[in-house]
Each structure stands twice: as C-alpha cells, then as structure tokens.
C-alpha cells in the first residue's frame, strides 16, 4: 500500500496564505478575490521575498510616491494624482494605520479594488 506524500507548500503559497489571513482579519474581507490577489502577487514579482521590499511603510512619503508612480501609474495606468492619493489613503485606512508593516500585495490589492482596476490587473 503506497503512502500518500504531501508536498510542502512553496514559499509563494505560504506568503499567499499570510495575505489571505490579513485580508480576512485586518481588512475584514470575508471572501477575498483570489484571482486578484494572485495577479497582484505576480505584479509584485520577487519583491515579496525580500524583507525590505515585502512590506510598505505607510508613513514613508518616498515609498508611497514610488507606489503611486510604479504600481498605480505604470501597472494600473492611472495618471490622476488626486485619485491615486485617495486610493492609497483609503487602502491604508482599510488595512489599519496601526499595522506598521503592511504586506505589499495586500496594499496593492486594496488600491486596485479602490480604483476599480482589478480587471485590468487580472488580464495583465
């Protein structure tokens, strides 16, 4: 009788589980959009594996400017700075200001939903 072997989860799968937990517990999304989360994780690329780039410091103006320019501007195609700033602010509020290190994919997920750009990100 052959024993069923279970494969250990990959580093990405472990991280995605953390992001899902954050969305459920800290954001309050009972049923996160897993397709959007997967698209956001892909958009982040290897940044999710590096300690320094895996999280976003919401109090760092330079970092938020990079999020606005690189993710919102380039990935989502939103040029309106007021809309981008409002989406960042709303995402930070949803995630919770008390959460110091916000996981980059979770914050990007919230920004994409706020800007109603989930479909554009999923097909990219």
Image: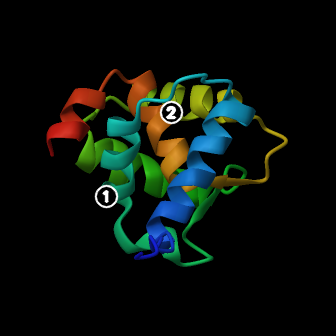
Residue 103 against residue 118 in the figure, above or below: below
Under tag 2, what secondary structure?
Answer: helix
Under tag 1, what secondary structure?
Answer: helix
- What is the quadrant of residue 121 in the picture? top left
Residue 23 against residue 49 in the figure, above or below: above
Residue sitting at x 73%, y 51% = 59
> Foreground: 8 or 55?
8
Pointer 2 local density, CA inside 10 Å: few below 14, some 14–19, many at least 20: many
Residue sitting at x 35%, y 42% = 72
The mark found on residue 124 in the picture is: none
Q: Which residue lies furthest to the left in this view?
A: 123
Residue 16 against residue 45 in the figure, above or below: above
The mark found on residue 42 in the picture is: 1
Q: Provide residue 76's location: percent of width, then percent of height.
A: 26, 39
Quickly name the residue at label 2: 110
Residue sitting at x 61%, y 31% = 89
Q: Which of the two discs, 1 and 2, labels the residue nearer the N terminus?
A: 1
> Foreground: 4 or 27?
4
């Amino acid at each position: 009788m052959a024993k069923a072997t279970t494969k250990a989860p990959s580093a990405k799968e472990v991280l995605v589980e953390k992001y899902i937990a954050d969305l459920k517990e800290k954001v309050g999304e009972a049923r996160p959009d897993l397709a959007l989360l997967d698209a956001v994780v892909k958009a982040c690329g290897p940044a999710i594996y590096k300690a320094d780039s895996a999280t976003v410091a919401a109090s760092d103006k330079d970092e938020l400017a990079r999020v606005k320019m690189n993710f919102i501007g380039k990935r989502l195609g939103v040029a309106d700075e007021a809309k981008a700033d409002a989406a960042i602010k709303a995402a930070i509020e949803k995630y919770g200001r008390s959460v110091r290190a916000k996981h980059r994919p979770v914050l990007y997920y919230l920004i994409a939903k706020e800007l109603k750009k989930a479909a554009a990100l999923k097909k990219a």
